[in-house]
Image (tube, rainbow, N blue to C red):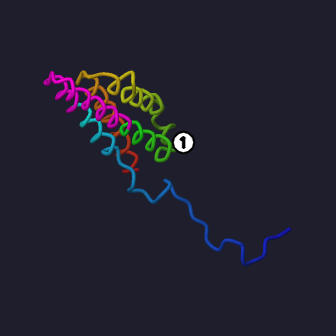
Amino acid sequence: MRLPRILTPRVSASAHCDLPCGVYDPAQARIEAESVKMICEKYQANTDPEFRTRAILIKEQRADLVKHHLWVLWTDYFKPPHFEKYPHLHQLFNEATKLAGAAGAKGATDPSKADELLQKIDEISKIFWETKQA
């Protein structure tokens, strides 16, 4: 059965992203990861148990936001051609999200864990901006 002519699309469109490019940016993950690092530094410099409890809660929230922003890039922005050109990209995202999680910055109070996370985000960012130039 053929669709009535009125229901037939007149224009077809395709897009690289869910929305026109420009809505994705690894800077969102980086800002949250920098917050995680600063909270770790403040945690280390303060012995007040109430302050430390609040710091851990906020740090964990920020670490979850890092994971969220990374996942959005991984699943919504990057497409199969990117993964073909950068075969280590899946591994890089896996390592970065783990560093943002309980095994990394979310579960630690050592600023060096946040530094490792920031390094991974920088690697992702470099690839991201290379794909934007293409």
Within the magenta stretch, is there residue 133?
Answer: no
Between residue 62 and residue 90, name the one nearer to us.
Answer: 62
Instruction: Indicate the quadrant where residue 33 lies.
Output: top left
**Image quadrant in which you'd find residue 42:** top left
Q: How many numbered marks does the figure carry?
A: 1
Magenta region includes residue 57: yes
Q: Position of residue 120 (x, y in %)?
A: 33, 31
Up-down: is 32 above or below 99?
A: below
Name the residue that disc number 1 marks: 80
- Looking at the picture, tell me which residue is in the foreground, 77 or 34: 34
Circle 1 packing at 10 Å, graded few (<14), some (14-19), many (20+), is few
Q: Position of residue 39 (x, y in %)?
A: 22, 32
Rendered position, 134 above or below 34: below
What residue type is disc 1 on?
Answer: Pro
- The location of residue 114, given as percent across then percent down, is 27, 28
Q: Quadrant of the N terminus?
A: bottom right
Question: What percent of the width, then of the height, locates residue 4?
Answer: 78, 75
Magenta range is 38-64
Q: Residue at x 26, y 27 (%)?
A: 53
Residue at the far right in the pictured view: 1
Please name the residue shown 45% across and 60% down the image: 20
Q: Is residue 93 left or right of residue 28?
A: right
